[in-house]
Structures are given as structure tokens and as C-alpha cells.
Amino acid sequence: MQGIDTSSITGRMFFQILGSIAEFEHALMSERTRDGLAAARARGRTGEQKPKLGPRQARLARKMYEEKNYDGKRAHTVQHIAEEFGVTRPTIYRHLAKP
């Protein structure tokens, strides 16, 4: 603690001034963030993460997944497909679930 005596009038006023300054700084930071997001949206940025697989890679992954061996079993496991594209298994499953 900084030793501010909040039992006196001066201490309470000082404490309120510090609180007001902190609230003002927070409002400035929020305003700058909103302005930055608006500027990014104006430049076409949405803030979303880029897909790990492009459309062509997703089609290739689906083709590999649907490929069968001579005995009717899948030629490639999801783990193998994921390793081939350098992504995780859930990423492959997410792309396979899309129509």
C-alpha cells in the first residue's frame, strides 16, 4: 500500500482523483481499440484466423480420405492426411464435415 490515508478528506480526494485518471486511461484505450478495429475493417480485415487448408488442399484431403484400397478399406488414415498437410486431425475432420 502507498500509505494513502482514506479516512481524511484529502486522502479520499486523492484516491478519487487516482481512480478518475485510471478510468480515463481505460476509456482512451477502449476508444483506440475500437478505432483500430474500425480501420482494419475498412481495409477488409475481419479479424478471423486464416484457414489452415485452402480450398484446393481441402479438396485433396477429401479425395485422399475417400480413396479406397483394393480390399475396400480406406487408403489413408486421418492421421496420415493431417501429417501430409501439416495440420492436426481435428482440422481435417472439420474440413471433411463441410459439404
Image: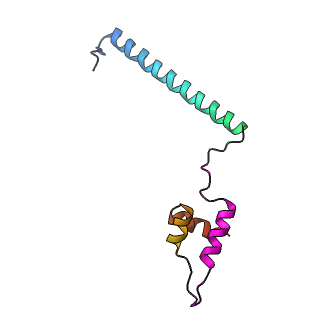
Residue 82 appears at what percent x and percent y?
53, 66
Residue 29 occupies which quadrant of the picture?
Answer: top right
Residue 86 appears at what percent x and percent y?
53, 60
Q: Please give the count of numbered marks on the rendered protein.
A: 0
Q: In the shown orientation, is residue 3 left or right of residue 14?
A: left
Q: In this view, does 46 lie above or below 58?
A: above
Name the colouring of the figure.
rainbow
Q: In the shown orientation, is residue 19 left or right of residue 89?
A: left
Q: Quadrant of the C terminus?
A: bottom right
Residue 12 or residue 34, whichever sits in front: 34
**Residue at the (29%, 17%) spot, across then down:** 2
**Residue at the (47%, 18%) spot, across then down:** 21
Judge whether residue 76 is colored magenta: no
Residue 42 or residue 7, whichever sits in front: 42
**Residue at the (66%, 44%) spot, across then down:** 46
Residue 80 or residue 40, whichever sits in front: 80
- The magenta segment is 48-73
Q: Residue furthest bottom?
A: 71
Residue 13 or residue 55, whichever sits in front: 55
**Residue at the (60%, 83%) spot, across then down:** 68
Judge whether residue 55 is colored magenta: yes
Q: In the shown orientation, is residue 31 left or right of residue 10?
A: right
Q: In the shown orientation, is residue 57 left or right of residue 76?
A: right
Q: Is residue 33 above or below residue 53?
A: above
Residue 31 occupies which quadrant of the picture?
Answer: top right
Residue 60 occupies which quadrant of the picture?
Answer: bottom right
Residue 57 appears at what percent x and percent y?
65, 63
Residue 42 appears at what percent x and percent y?
72, 37
